[in-house]
Amino acid sequence: GHLFDSMFTNTALDMVSKKGNFEILDFIVMNTVSAQRESQLILDVTADSDDVLAEIIKEITSLGSVLEVRVQELEKDVHLHVDTAKMPEKPPRKVLLLGSGMVAAPVVDYLTKSEDRVVTIVSDSLEAAQALTARSPKLTSAVELSVEPMDAANAEWCAHLDELIQENDVVISLLPPPFHPSIARRCIRSKTHLVTASYVSPEMVTMHTEAKRNGVVILNEMGLDPGIDHMSAMKLIHEAKETGGVVTSFSSVCGGLSSPDALLPDNPLQYSFSWSPAGVMSAALTPAKYLRDGTVVEIDGSRKLYDAEPFKGWPSLNLEVSANRDSISFADVYGIEDSVETMFRGTLRFEGWCKLMFGFTKLGLLDAAHAAREGQTWEELLSGLAEKRGYGSTRDLLLNDLTHDEADRVLAALDWLGASGELPLGSENANAAFVNLLSDKLSLQPGERDLVLMRHDLKFKWPNGEERETNSSLIAFGEHDTTAMAKTVGLTAAIGANLILEGHLDDKCGLASPMMKEVFIPALERLEEEGITFNESTKLIK
């Protein structure tokens, strides 16, 4: 009777029911004290995958180990016999991928490694979407549909997009961040989960309650930065907290760069674009806020570029770092707000990039409000921008904020980029003209590699007074057909979708985040399986 008395039977069957199914094949129960023959429970256990089945068996075995001790005290042994069998095949889970740009290929490759995933790729370029389906023709399909701009007044367009979302289990949006709120609202109505690689916007936050009510997971910030940066930092913080440690100093930097072997020596920016140039420009101009030795530092977008500092995390690389967005807000997110005195998140570039970008900003080249016209020359555009700001020439405008040498370098960089003659086609404003210029001159070329760098420097303190510093760093180079940026962003987004489909976030409906242990623990393990690994070192300070 011990199988009943100890509640082993009910507990074991509950464990199986949460993740799989069972059938009792045989159940022999003898009197606990006087029986000469052991009691025996034989189960047929089934699950969706070998991994889930292994988890079930591990949990039941652990339960049996605990109860063996109690049984031995009663001079009785209990043995669990588990017979595994595969469940009948289920229909594949469906993923809708919005976007076919630079980071889409690793998403498709990762999801279609398993035949129980099918991916529909939506793009305004059918050719681009079909190029992705060629990577796994049996498990992918392509749909041509422009989502820029989102035409809410077009009933046929709305119906088509809504139908696609409804037909799938999860949506991965690789669209620009401004489109995500609209996609999220459609996903919530359709009860379809959503994954993005972008920061959570205030508008997205307002959708938490409705998403939770509809049983929808909205998992944002599943990329490189944000994404892998959060998860790898949370791992360090989580491990320290488990032993009573608190964080007193937090510094995290990341950069998507060109591999040095892909850069021409005369390239003044020492940079090539491995992701959207418009995205790079937007991030560069975002105001920053951080905490340094207990003092709050706030700085506007352009000035943070001018104030960039050398970074010696990799002494062999000539790097600089500028502050990235509002670092202080992440102290609350990471759960370290009560102890941290320095809280800094930064963006890495090769030396010289930030000062040049500051100069371009001062010229007005990132000004989307300044209209450009067809046939206009660069000289006319630059002169107009200077006059708009009250200066007689481009050089005079630069000298208001830069030294003569710094101004000369900005003008020489414009000349190297090719800012002469007529503006590029499609240049409706100054910002668009400059982005087009950068895209033409600095796009990563076939055969060239990019480079992703990430480093965390954290200081911890324990109740006994012990203090330690931990460094954790990632270096990833692009491969022959995939950039490091695409791999780190795409894999992370795809892993996020799989975690949802596998039920890891069933209890986290609403706005979910990579800072949740249900996300960062399994996600980092899977990234490591794909070669995305961190090197860690710790030293005693006190």
Image: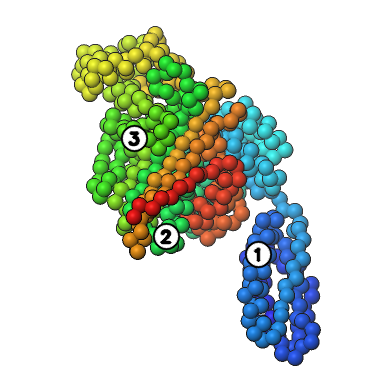
Above/below status of 278 relative to 539:
above
Quarter of the image holding residue 53? Answer: bottom right
**Which residue: 64% across, 38% down?**
109
Helix, strand, or loop for circle 3?
Answer: strand
Q: Residue furthest top?
A: 421
* Tag 1 residue: 58
Q: Residues within 10 Å of mark 3 (few under 14, many from 20)?
A: many
**Which residue: 64% across, 85% down?**
73
The amino acid type found where label 3 is placed reads Ser
Identify the mark at residue 322; answer none if there is no mark. 3
Q: CA distance from mark 1 to mark 3?
A: 47 Å
Q: Nearer the viewer, residue 109 or 148?
A: 109
**Which residue: 43% across, 31% down?**
316
Above/below status of 259 relative to 498:
above
Q: Residues within 10 Å of mark 2 (few under 14, many from 20)?
A: some
* Tag 2 residue: 241
Can residue 489 be spotted in the picture? yes
Q: Position of residue 407 (x, y in %)?
A: 27, 18
Helix, strand, or loop for circle 1?
Answer: helix
| Earlier sequence position, callout 1 versus callout 3 | 1
